[in-house]
């Protein structure tokens, strides 16, 4: 299924049904009283988060969603039926934004979460509602109230416990494929990964969700390469795994490039806990690994794990380090 993490749609809840003007008619009853029923309520727009979706592709080919109108009132004091609500199913992590793409209206973060986003219009009163002791034959009625309508943006921010960052071809997709059952596209050229990928990782009887994002390059915040469009998916992660390609000539510069893009993107990404790993070490000699590790640690000001997704070197220790941060965050939030 094609990945889509942003869509603009039009929503309209249903109008209420009109009230009815009617008078009771029966043999031998010459002056029957008013018996016009009330109109029914229009359908609500309900947004529901479901856990078997991970894309907004359903909203690419249909942008207009309108709930049904309530039934009109009828004679015999029969009220109109309320219209069925229109349910829109979205992936967990979907945000509903106003048309300005900045004002957050709704954040769907829990499976099964349901919100009545737009209420249907109330039905109008029939003439029996206006009967009084001084006005026993009213011809007054109310039309149904209009529903609400709104253009909104849907923006998906995948919910993952940990996120992979690094330059293109840093080995992120290979790492994800090895530690989970995810099957991302893997090839020896930059920008192989064009959309975010999720995988469930198991380590020491624990599990967590790991997200692989398309690689960043210098100037991504200005739209260079694939830009920083997918960085929003990292906002919900508890910890970042920063992979640096050990075969690069300048691993320190590679690290600083990504850190600068995270800083320029904002949203506190640069403040998130980070685990640093020197990847693809199976391609280097022990002496080269030691030199690259020292260079990277000096540039980053922190220790770096020696890692190779292909040979399995350092994989378990990396996963344990990730889970330690995730577990601490879960305990803190509880």
Image (tube, grey):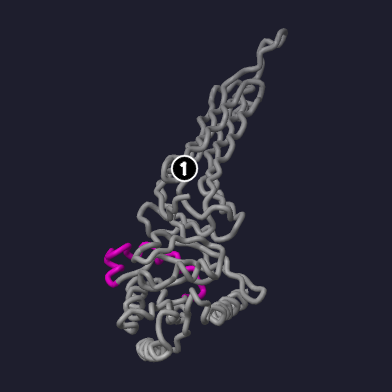
**Whether residue 198 can be seen here:** yes
Q: Secondary structure at mark 1?
A: loop
Q: Which residue is mark 1?
A: 148
Q: Quadrant of residue 203?
A: bottom right
Q: As rendered, which of 109 and 103 lies closer to the eye?
A: 109
Residues drawn in magenta: 218-240
Q: As rendered, which of 48 and 156 lies closer to the eye?
A: 156
Q: Position of residue 242 (x, y in %)?
A: 43, 77
Q: Quadrant of the C terminus?
A: bottom right
Q: Residue furthest top?
A: 28
Q: Position of residue 5 (x, y in %)?
A: 43, 55
Q: Is residue 115 left or right of residue 240?
A: right
**Whether residue 301 can be seen here:** no
Q: Quadrant of residue 300?
A: bottom left
The structure residue drawn at horizontal position 53% and vertical position 44%, both measured from the top left corner, is 45
Q: As rendered, which of 325 and 251 lies closer to the eye?
A: 251
Q: Is residue 236 magenta?
A: yes
Q: Position of residue 23 (x, y in %)?
A: 62, 18
> How dense is the environment of label 1, judged by Cα within 10 Å: few (below 14), some, or many (20 and up)?
some
């Amino acid at each position: 299924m094609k990945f889509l993490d942003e869509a603009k749609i039009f929503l309209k809840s249903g109008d209420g049904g009109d009230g009815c003007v009617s008078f009771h008619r029966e043999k031998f009853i010459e002056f029957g009283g008013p018996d016009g029923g009330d109109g029914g309520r229009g359908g609500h727009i309900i947004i529901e988060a479901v856990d078997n979706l991970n894309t907004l592709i359903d909203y690419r080919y249909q942008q207009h969603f309108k709930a049904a109108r309530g039934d009109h009132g009828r004679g015999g004091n029969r009220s109109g039926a309320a219209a069925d609500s229109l349910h829109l199913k979205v992936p967990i992590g979907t945000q509903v934004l106003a048309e300005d793409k900045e004002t957050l209206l709704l954040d769907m973060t829990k499976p099964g979460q349901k919100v009545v986003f737009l209420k249907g219009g109330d039905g109008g009163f029939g003439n029996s509602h206006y009967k009084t002791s001084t006005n026993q034959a009213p011809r007054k009625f109310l039309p149904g109230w209009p529903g609400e309508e709104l253009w909104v943006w849907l923006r998906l921010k995948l919910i993952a416990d940990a996120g992979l960052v690094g330059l293109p071809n840093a080995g992120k997709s290979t790492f994800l494929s090895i530690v989970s059952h995810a099957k991302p596209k893997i090839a020896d050229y930059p920008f192989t990964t064009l959309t975010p990928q999720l995988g469930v990782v198991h380590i020491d009887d624990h599990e967590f969700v790991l997200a692989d994002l398309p690689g960043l390059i210098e100037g991504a915040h200005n739209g260079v390469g694939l830009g920083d469009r997918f960085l929003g998916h990292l906002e919900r992660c508890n910890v970042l795994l920063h992979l640096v390609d050990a075969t690069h000539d300048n691993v320190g510069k590679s690290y600083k490039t990504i850190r600068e893009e995270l800083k320029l993107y904002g949203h506190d990404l640069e403040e998130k806990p980070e685990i640093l790993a020197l990847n693809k070490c199976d391609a280097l000699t022990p002496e080269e690994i030691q030199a690259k590790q020292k260079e990277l640690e000096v540039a980053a000001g922190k220790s770096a794990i020696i890692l190779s997704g292909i040979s399995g070197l350092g994989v378990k220790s990396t996963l344990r380090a990730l889970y330690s941060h995730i577990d601490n965050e879960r305990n803190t939030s509880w």
